[in-house]
Image (tube, rainbow, N blue to C red):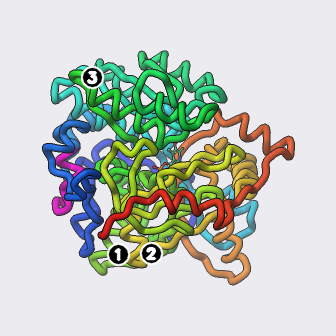
Amino acid sequence: MEDKKIPYKIYLEEGEMPKQWYNVRADMKNKPEPLLNPGTLQPMTAEELGHVFCDELVKQELDDTTAYIDIPEEIQSFYKMYRPSPLVRAYCLEQKLDTPAKIYYKFEGNNTSGSHKLNSAIAQAYYAKKQGLKGVTTETGAGQWGTALSMACSYFDLDCKVYMVKVSYEQKPFRREVMRTYGASVTPSPSETTAVGRKILQEHPGTTGSLGCAISEAVEAATSTEGYRYVLGSVLNQVLLHQSIIGLETKIALDKYGIKPDIIIGCAGGGSNLGGLVSPFMGEKLRGEADYRIIAVEPASCPSLTRGKFAYDFCDTGKVCPLAKMYTLGSGFIPSPNHAGGLRYHGMSSILSKLYDDGLMEACSVEQTAVFEAAEQFARVEGILPAPESSHAIRVAIDEAMKCKQTGEEKTIVFGLTGTGYFDMVAYEKFHNGEMNDYIPTDEDLKPGFDSLPKVDK
Ligand SMILES: *Cc1c(COP(=O)(O)O)cnc(C)c1O
């Protein structure tokens, strides 16, 4: 197809929007391992999960076989406020790099929360409301998930209690105020408001917190308050399911112009945006219909896929959550405070972990100064100021495009631009002032995390 016919932005018409999510597990021959009860080490039952999560979400979490799941009308309507998100042909970046590669990015930052997280937040709030619950609790690290959930809860008139990792709470007061604007209550974690928070504070006085701690607190708050459930913004199967909207829209847009990607790249924290972006493509790969190179990009300072172990582990520091089999650095792992770029979670989605272990996708890690260099280069030519998390994918997309320049190959590269970085200016400031360093944990540094892995024979 003539290149010129491809617009800068490919949008979908309202009628072309996906009406179902896609569940990649249905096409996986080797299913991801089930969540285990940490006491009995038996697979978690729907009833057990129902104490923590909403019933419909438990169903989605455990469903390994239904390929397509209807998106309820109310969620479709909400999606229409900010979706479809554009698939952008990065003509300006290609020109600047002088590469024969064709680069596309799916931009998820066009909503107030500034990231893809709203796609799952609205679904989770919807099911909580439908169940007649009073409210939900959650954790947030950098703040995007808490913001997305606050927006979703205010839309459905639900209470929203957010435990925010203390270091972010202090560094990002504006994020906190956005959440409060949408009616959420925000508590810095670890806090004195929960038993697990008090315990963590006693063992690690002065800790600036971690996602794992905040999860423990949010779960405790949900399970000890009548009419509340806990919701999580990444890692879980249900979240990847909701995020499949990203990949489905991308695929429809590409198919409209007969474009077939060679390489699909996404940043990986807990794996939700990457899982969502690649799901429909991975489905084709699993069914033997097409082949793609799929690359997960993670920070060198929190390298769960590239240096972690594929093992059953706790999803949280307080060890109150079920065990998930995943690539993990150990629930005791806390990334260096020098690390500014998000993607700090110790583990990785069970679905992506399984696909990676089966050799169906690749992973690489990048250092944060290289990430911010790519972020700045991208901002200057494409206009969008990217989130540091998203910039991990930009880094590798640029690297792959530069390889094409050397070989002359006209590869088509698609990457996920998960969000904007307006609330990350402290990190950008460090980069500009030359105060950012590339701390990479040694094997010695990683050892305590691995030693904290539970002994599970599965
Ligand atoms: C949360 C977040 C991520 C990482 O989370 P995943 O679950 O791995 O997608 C990436 N980018 C942005 C902008 C985020 O807010």
Q: Nearer the viewer, residue 96 or 148?
A: 148
Task: Say what amino acid the circle numbered 2 marks.
Answer: Tyr
Q: Earlier in the sequence, mark 1 or mark 3?
A: 3
Q: Earlier in the sequence, mark 2 or mark 1?
A: 1
The residue closer to the viewer here, 22 or 107, is 22
Q: Is residue 433 above or below residue 26?
A: above
Q: Residues within 10 Å of mark 2 (few under 14, many from 20)?
A: some
Q: CA distance from mark 2 to mark 3?
A: 46 Å
Picture quadrant where residue 446 is located: bottom right
Look at the numbered disc 1 and give the secondary structure of its residue.
helix
Residue at image position (40%, 62%) is 326
Residue appearing at x 69%, y 58% in the figure: 93
Expressed as whole percent of the image width and height from the top left, the position of residue 107 reads 52, 47
Vertical side of 331 occupied by 403: above or below? below
Label 3 belongs to which residue? Answer: 225
Residue 337, labelled with which disc?
none
Label 2 or label 3, whichever lies nearer to me, is 3
Q: Residues within 10 Å of mark 1 (few under 14, many from 20)?
A: some
Helix or strand or loop: what does disc 3 sit on? loop
Label 3 crowd bin: few (<14), some (14–19), many (20+), radius 10 Å: few
Residue type at the position of mark 1:
Lys
Residue located beneath label 2 in the image: 292
Segment tinted magenta in the rendering: 58-66
Residue occupied by mark 1:
285
**Disc 1 and disc 3 in contact, CB within 8 angstroms:** no
